[in-house]
Image: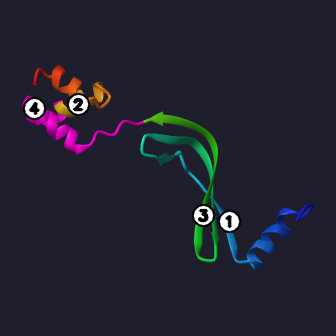
Amino acid sequence: MMGMNPRQMKKLMRQMGIKMEELDGVEEVIIRLEDREIVIREPAVTVITAHGERSYQIVGEEEIREVLRIPEEDIRLVMEQTGADYETAKKSLEETKGDIAEAIIKLGGA
């Protein structure tokens, strides 16, 4: 396929049942993992449709964000031990990076 002009390439792809289109107006793409997020700002996104399947090609600068997910049962435990409301218990766990004992002590429970 080397040396093939873009018009020939599009024709060949069409014959193979492959459709490509640029997705306009994309501001960012976020890929959420268990402990972090991969954020791609102002990406170039191409949608490729082949054999009834859609694939996305994403090109851009990535940023990695660490994410702390606090389990509901941890929040409930801190609430029970301290008498704190849901938001206060959750905030305390976030501030202590999920350390239940430290969150309880911080709120004056035990």
Q: Quadrant of residue 18?
A: bottom right
Residue 44 image offset from top left, x and y in percent: 64, 49
Q: CA distance from mark 2 to mark 3?
A: 42 Å
CB atoms at circles 3 and 1 under 8 Å apart?
Answer: no
Going from N to C along the chain, the mark reached first, 1 or 2, is 1
- Residue at 9% of width from left, 36% of height from top? 80
Going from N to C along the chain, the mark reached first, 3 or 1, is 1
Q: Nearer the viewer, mark 3 or mark 1?
A: 3
Q: CA distance from mark 3 to mark 4?
A: 48 Å
Per the image, label 3 sits on a secondary structure element best described as: strand
User: Can residue 84 be seen in this snapshot?
Assistant: no
Residue 51 image offset from top left, x and y in percent: 63, 77
Residue 20 image label:
1
Three-letter code, disc 4: Gln
User: Can residue 64 be seen in this snapshot?
Assistant: yes
Three-letter code, disc 3: Ser
Q: Nearer the viewer, mark 2 or mark 3?
A: 2
Q: CA distance from mark 3 to mark 1?
A: 10 Å
Going from N to C along the chain, the mark reached first, 4 or 1, is 1
- The residue that mark 2 highlights is 100
- The residue that mark 4 highlights is 81
Lateral position of residue 106 relative to residue 59, left or right: left
Q: Nearer the viewer, residue 5 or 70?
A: 70
**Quarter of the picture holding the N terminus:** bottom right
Q: Is residue 98 magenta?
A: no
Q: Nearer the viewer, residue 55 or 101?
A: 101
- Residue at 21% of width from left, 39% of height from top? 74
The residue segment tinted magenta is 67-88
Residue 41 image offset from top left, x and y in percent: 56, 40
Q: Residues within 10 Å of mark 4 (few under 14, many from 20)?
A: some
